[in-house]
Image (tube, rainbow, N blue to C red):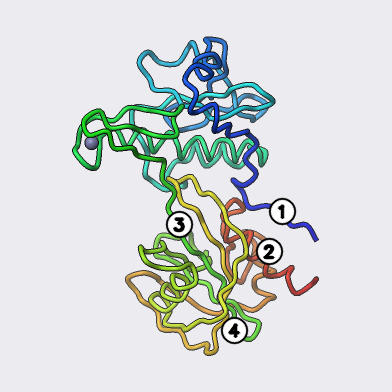
Amino acid sequence: MKRKQPAFAGHPLDRADPVRGDPARLAELAHAEARLLRLEGLIPRLGEDRRLQWDRLGDAPPGAETVFLGLLDGEALFAAVPQEGDPDPAYTRRETWAALGHLPPEELALYGGARSLLDWHARHRFCPQCASPTVLAKGGWQRDCTGCGAQQFPRTDPVTIMLVEHRGNLLLGRKAGFPEGSYSALAGFIEPGETIEEAVAREVFEEAGVLVRDVSYIASQPWPFPSQLMIACHAHADDDKVTIDKTELEDARWFTREEVAEALNKGPESTSFRAPFAIAVANHMLRWWLEKDDE
Ligand SMILES: [Zn+2]
């Protein structure tokens, strides 16, 4: 059975790496009539058709850095770096959040990739090594330091997010800031020196006091707020005793298959719990979990 991809997957552009490293080819593509993604800061400005809109590269704000997003059917697409980045979560930006719900999957992926890249540029204008100003290079897929010459590359931060299963039930948790009744998969950043499997086991034990084994991979999702790679995993627990770290979680408990199905199918009307947003990888994971035993 072919499953749907998580939201923000399926980027439609040819990333065209040879073009990035070819200044002459880039200059040729970056003519005034080339397409520039319409944004206000990092917020997408949709048309009446609720699709992404494009302006002319010649109308980019004077002095703004522009990045080469890639090629769509041979045509180069660009976006301008805003004055300021935005490290806040998506749901704190109502306009962005509303726009995301309208975009078709390929445009969601295109916007997500552009947002992560633009936000990185806006927040990396100085060298972490010598504090001199940095300048955009390779069409926007690198920044070079004007002082020491160090090169910086757009970052992606790996995060594990996991479904922990014990005798057909799933462990889900809620943080204090979650909407009322919402539960989701436990998650945490991978630390230096850790494998994916080790990060899954550490996070589940830290947050819920549950020991897990047999960690397996489900899917991944580029999450552009600001630039995480969500690595979705499944793991087994031998014991259902939960010891919650209250500094991390408000609650964590086991849910039955029926409760998970109700949360996904009934949305806000669900009496079991509120499932994660449709664009969150956790929502995709819960659907995967319900379907996997039906195959
Ligand atoms: Zn430097």
* Amino acid found under the numbered disc labelled 3: Pro
Q: CA distance from mark 3 to mark 1?
A: 22 Å
* Amino acid found under the numbered disc labelled 1: Lys
In this figure, which residue is indicated by the disc labeled 1? Answer: 4
- Disc with the residue nearer the chain's start (2 vs 1): 1
**Cβ(mark 1) to ligand 1 < 8 Å?**
no
Q: Percent position (x, y) of residue 247?
A: 32, 71
Q: Secondary structure at mark 1?
A: loop
What residue do we see at 59% from left, 77% from top?
170
- Disc with the residue nearer the chain's start (4 vs 3): 3
In this figure, which residue is indicated by the disc labeled 3? Answer: 158
State the mark number for residue 287.
Answer: 2
Q: Percent position (x, y) of residue 268?
A: 61, 59
Circles 2 and 4 in contact, beta carbons < 8 Å: no
Horizontally, residue 287 falls left or right of residue 207, namely right
Q: CA distance from mark 2 to mark 3?
A: 22 Å
Q: Percent position (x, y) of residue 83?
A: 34, 27
Q: Depth check: 152 or 148 in front?
A: 148
Q: Which numbered disc, 2 or 1, marks the residue closer to the eye?
A: 1
Q: CA distance from mark 4 to mark 3?
A: 26 Å
Q: Secondary structure at mark 3?
A: strand
